[in-house]
Image (cartoon, grey):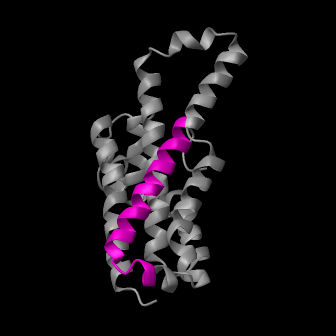
Amino acid sequence: MLNPGQPAPLAVLLGTLGVLAWGHDHRYGTIRPLLMVLPDRRILAVARTVVMTGYLLTVVLLAEALAWLTGLLATGGDLAEFASDGLVQRAGLGLVVLGLGLGWFGLALGALLPSLPAAIGAYVIYPVVVEPLVALIVGQIHENAQLWLPFASFGALVGVDAGGPPPAVAAVLFLGVMVVLNLAGVIRFRTRDV
């Protein structure tokens, strides 16, 4: 759905939990009591981001470990010879970056959009519909320019697309866009009426 290398259920789960990390307080009215206990919104924003980042890294690393364990058991250990392959290691690191970025994307949408269903819808629609449409337009302007869009740049990180940014630049581009979106979400949270 979002990337052929990432299982769609995990991708949707990470983003949905990111959306819920911000959005549920406003939807269910628990933000007022929370802000009475912790009135500094910056501390709350940093705490949520740090906790969510730790959660995302834990889930993604566990998912990768389980995938490797399953592969080792299914192949009778033959999969172990591929563990030192550079492309496999890059793909593994890329999936960690993708999981972190997807969770941060959901976190940003939960902070930016006042409606939980709208935030979850935007989470699914942007990488599946909006960015591919933008890629069609940008691709007509300059060859391979679409590979520099946030979600499309991820392909270079895992070795799927050639002609885009180098892998390190792709990771910085993808995560950088998510950080900028989260900063916008924090600014929105600081000015948002409760």
Residue lying at 46% horizontally and 45% vertically, measured from the top left: 98
- The part of the image, by quadrant, that contains residue 14 is bottom right
Residue 142, compared with residue 44, is above or below; it is: above
Return the x and y of residue 106 as percentages of the image width and height.
50, 62
> Looking at the magenta stretch, what is its main secondary structure?
helix
Q: Does the magenta stretch include residue 47?
A: yes
Residue lying at 47% horizontally and 30% vertically, measured from the top left: 92
Instruction: Pick out the residue farthest to the front.
Output: 37
Residue 10, compared with residue 92, is above or below; it is: below
Residue lying at 33% horizontally and 78% vertically, measured from the top left: 40
Residue lying at 61% horizontally and 55% vertically, measured from the top left: 12
Instruction: Pick out the residue farthest to the bottom.
Output: 193
- Can residue 193 be seen here? yes
Instruction: Name the side, left or right, on which 167 lies relative to 126.
Output: left
Name the foreground residue: 156 vs 110. Answer: 110
Q: Is residue 120 magenta?
A: no
- Can residue 166 be seen here? no
Residue extent of the magenta highlight: 35-61
- The part of the image, by quadrant, that contains residue 185 is bottom left
Name the foreground residue: 144 vs 117. Answer: 117
Return the x and y of residue 178 as percentages of the image width and height.
37, 58
